[in-house]
Amino acid sequence: MPLLLYPFSACVPPPRALLRRLSPPPPMAAVAPPLGRSVTLLPSVGALDLPPLPPPATDDFHWLDLFAFLNSPADSYQIPQQDDEELYADEGMELELEFELEKVAEMERARERARKAQHRRLRQRQVKAETEAWARAAEEYREIEREMLDRRLAPSLPYVKSLFVGWFEPLRDAIARDQEVQRRKRVKHVYAKYLLLLPADKVAVIVMHKMMGLLMSSKDGSGSVRVVQAAHCIGEAVEREFKVQAFFQKSRRKGKGKDQGETDPSLEKEQAKCRKRVKSLVRRRKLSEAQKLVQQEIELEEWGTEAQVKLGTRLIELLLDSAFVQSPADQSPDSSPDFRPAFRHVLRQPIVENGKLKKKHWVIECDPLVHEGFESTARHVDIPYLPMLVPPIKWTGYDKGGHLFLPSYIMRTHGVKDQKDAIKSVPRKQLRRVFEALDILGSTKWRVNRRVHDVVETIWSRGGAIAGLVDKGNIPLPERPESEDPDEIQKWKRSLKKAKKTNRELHAERCDTELKLSVARRMREEDGFYYPHNLDFRGRAYPMHPHLSHLGSDLCRGLLEYAEGRPLGKSGLRWLKIHLANKYGGGIEKLSHESKIAFVDNQLPDIFDSAAHPVDGNGWWMNAEDPFQCLAACMDLSDALNSSSPHRAVSHLPIHQDGSCNGLQHYAALGRDYMGAVAVNLVPGEKPADIYSEIAARVLDVVREDAMKDPATDPTASLARVLVDQVDRKLVKQTVMTSVYGVTYIGARQQITKRLQEKGLITDDKLLYDVSCYATRVTLDALGQMFQSARGIMAWLGDCAKMIASKNQPVKWTSPVGLPVVQPYKKYKNYMIRTSLQCLALRREGDAIAIQRQKAAFPPNFVHSLDSSHMMMTAIACKEAGLHFAGVHDSFWVHACDVDQMNQILREQFVELYNMPILENLLEEFQTLFPTLEFPPCPPQGNFDVREVLTSTYFFN
């Protein structure tokens, strides 16, 4: 019964492009085909990738046909033969392709192995940097001591390091003796249990370095520090080091336990169990065992300010008794060496400084020999904690994230319990965007711009005083007049006091510059490093490293660049030119983008000269408002234009986009204020609007009008005539900028006084004060007229805050990204504690709310929580778009090629932020938290459409 679907004799497979060598088929039993049929058999159906058969007919199939086909010898079907040369050529091409693919894959695997190995090495270095910083310094001093004993010769050391070597042994021995005394005592001092937690040599290093660091970084450059500040800082440093070591050791034990399959009990059960055991041991008078358990318990608790200060003062006392200096060898051979204490405990008398009375207080003051050596050898002072070599740990909680072992907290609460409790109490899901934004900021990889660093070091070695670097020399002191006229003597004393104050400030600036350059020297050879970030209580993000970061001055920003470069592209080259013009300043930053590009094109010879000969050239870049950032841009642009393809040139420079008086931008968006929106570039314009110039023009109109009046009838006329030639954008800029953040009349007056002093046209102090008061009143009036909507919102926020604070409750709210914000302003109580050195007055947070501070601070703090929310939303969106984002409050940074994309993102995020009913949500939250209070309704809104921001070129620029 013929049921064959498809005649096998017609089943001829199509030729294949390439056939692998076929292995011999297995032996098969031959079956004779049916008579009368010509059947050509295939060796193996599955071995050939035959095309699918056409739909078969059902009238000619027989099972014997199929059985015969499947069991026929392989040679009964002949595969169409390919040419041998073509076959081997195709096979060779395939093998070569497979070899190349395998080679590429192996290279990729090798790179991945190398990357992981490099990461492991960097992580090991980071762990050592966090856990062994003070131990390494102590070992260095011990090594120097051994060398001195072996060679009987003092090694050649930098001045400060030679002082440390001389102080290390006596201070270490004094601490060790005190530790031994405290161990033997039955009734111990309060600080004793903390003093015994670290080895004496490590404690000695911490005390020396912290004390010198405080003296070097004093803002007035006086070489002194308050006792309470020094004690708290030293005690806090000892606590931090102990907790680092405890956490490190616990992590190692935990790792070993996991390897052995052990499981740890929960923390709470462990604490409760430990407390019970301590009580039991104390009852049985097994005090040594109880002390060991208490030491383990200390790892888990906060020491508190009082304990830190008591420990710190005892260590300062030991330092005072152990550290000495010797005057230079200019004495007669017969005289005995002049050894003096390196530090003195001194009572400072009350003084008036910047219009404020400073009460008498105790300070630790260093000897002039120590003070004079700061500037030249500040680079040799060890900075224990530097930027991280590996990405920070991702944030997952209040104290979970940031550094690997150093204690890291997501918010800088400064000991305020309400803030800490608020952020600990909210669900982690609510803080997801906050965590993510901080992780993005911390994962940005930086490196030192070596070419700019070389220029800075050259200028610094030649004495500074150019490109914004502080002068390494002091100003000369005025000589005493020969006349004994009392007025002349009084004038000389005032000028002498002023000159000494200036020299102290110069000294402080020089020490600060040395600390920044010290970090740059340490990090210069690293391929990259990272800055872990955390928040202040309003939500603004800050790098956790104190000295060299992109949050700092022009010097810091000029020294840093992205570790990863990206090709400029056409738009990147354009933005690089705009960035250079912005950093040059001098009014150029207020021009349109096209005018900025034209300015840069006209200055190309100077730009090329600045890049090629930054120190000995014509110095065009030194006249910029931000000289070192301008120099970095000159070098980047010069490299691109001198390359064969400028658009393909790789740039590491971060390009900034800054808000135009960002606080007023937020107020204009909150109130939908069209007039305010135009003034701060929320509305599209042909060139950027300049709010500072607008206010300056209004102030100048009022001053000119007052100057025309008769001084006999109007006392402001004479003041206006003095001021009329000094009104400009710079005079009012800082006051306008800070008015939105709640600057007071006194603060604004001090700002304007400083600007007038810089001009140097008014030398009489009384006249300077009167003119400053007049200029301040006129400036604040002009601001109030121009931003009436902002004033209305500020007044509403202040009224709400006053109502809440009147109930003895702090003002608290939730930012748009879910961060709980609590204002920390309470009335503090002073209390005295007795220490081994002196009685100290400490401040403790009281229960009463500071009503006026809560009211005055709420408007600026609320706006800060909004600008921080905008920055976080932008950071997250930029990360999702693949951009390398960095931010400093209202200044957003990316590579030049990515500026256009970031500009679109930040505008979209601003619109998304203000599509929320922010003031309505705030009022609803207040009504929920304080249901018994009757809050005023939200201020009325204008007709500004916030979506206009999307097409505003100069909103951020």
Image (cartoon, helix red, strand yellow):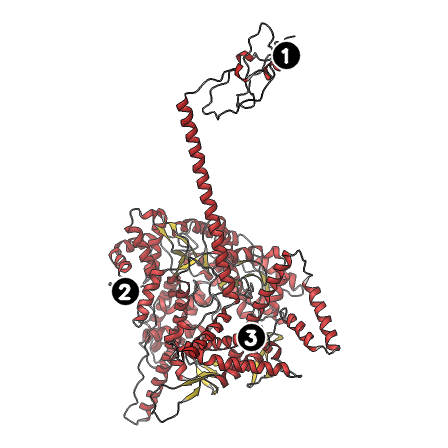
Percent coordinates x, y for residue 76 in the rendering: 53, 14
Give amino acid for label 1.
Leu
Describe residue 306's horizontal placement relative to residue 895 as left or right: right
Q: Neighbour class for label 2 at 10 Å: few (<14), some, many (≥20)?
A: some
Between disc 2 and disc 1, the foreground one is: 1
Q: Residue at x 52, y 74 (%)?
A: 202
- Quadrant the N terminus occupies: top right
Tell me whether circle 1 and circle 3 mark residues in contact (CB < 8 Å): no
Percent coordinates x, y for residue 794 in the rendering: 52, 65
Q: Residue at x 56, y 21 (%)?
A: 45
Mark linked to residue 64: 1
Tell me whether circle 2 and circle 1 mark residues in contact (CB < 8 Å): no
Inter-mark Cα distance, 2 to 1: 97 Å
Inter-mark Cα distance, 3 to 2: 49 Å
Give amino acid for label 2.
Val
Visible in this render: residue 945? no
SS at mark 3 in the image = loop
Give amino acid for label 3.
Pro
Residue highlighted by disc 2:
615
Visible in this render: residue 22? yes
Q: Which is more toward the observer, 679 or 18?
A: 18
